[in-house]
Image (cartoon, rainbow, N blue to C red):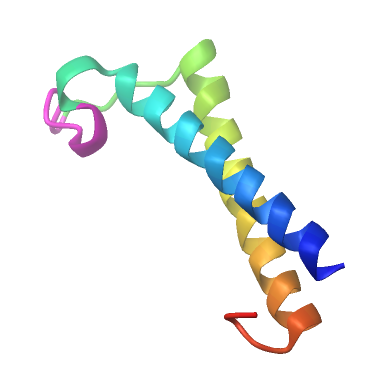
């Protein structure tokens, strides 16, 4: 069981990294730090909204898996 949780957590971490990089790449130069549009509120539409929602979903799922892993193994480091 712990091996399955560890593998799932690793795969989810890789997916989360990829989706965050996709999200950062969609806003060009300022990407990660949002330097390009400071103070300009705008709505997310289309693919950008989907990627944003997927990022939130994957982050929550990663947190749930991490907590489940701690509960199953009895320690945070395994």
Q: Is residue 73 above or below residue 49?
A: below
Q: Is residue 70 above or below residue 9?
A: below
Q: Left or right? Give the position of 5 relative to 56.
A: right
Q: Left or right? Give the position of 41 relative to 64.
A: left
Total number of numbered discs in the rendering: 0
Q: Is residue 36 above or below residue 75?
A: above
Q: Position of residue 24 (x, y in %)?
A: 32, 27
Residue drawn 46% across and 18% down? 48
Q: Is residue 56 magenta?
A: no
**Residue most toward the bottom?**
74
Residue drawn 72% across and 72% down? 69
Residue drawn 75% across and 82% down? 73
Residue drawn 57% across and 36% down? 15
Closer-to-camera residue (49/30): 30
Q: Quadrant of residue 11?
A: top right
Majority secondary structure in the magenta region = loop
Q: Quadrant of residue 42?
A: top left
Q: Is residue 36 magenta?
A: yes
Closer-to-camera residue (29/4): 4
Closer-to-camera residue (10/54): 10
Q: Left or right? Give the position of 47 relative to 8.
A: left
**Residues rendered magenta in the picture:** 31-39
**Residue most toward the front?**
3
Q: Position of residue 34 (x, y in %)?
A: 20, 32
Q: Position of residue 10 (x, y in %)?
A: 62, 51
**Which quadrant would the N terminus be assigned to in this image?**
bottom right
**Which quadrant would the C terminus be assigned to in this image?**
bottom right
Q: Is residue 29 above or below residue 32?
A: above
């Amino acid at each position: 069981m712990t091996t399955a949780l560890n593998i799932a957590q690793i795969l989810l971490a890789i997916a989360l990294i990829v989706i965050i990089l996709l999200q950062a790449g969609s806003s060009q130069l300022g990407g990660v730090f949002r330097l390009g549009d400071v103070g300009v509120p705008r709505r997310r539409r289309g693919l950008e909204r989907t990627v944003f929602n997927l990022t939130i979903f994957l982050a929550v799922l990663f947190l749930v898996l991490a907590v489940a892993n701690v509960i199953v193994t009895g320690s945070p480091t395994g």
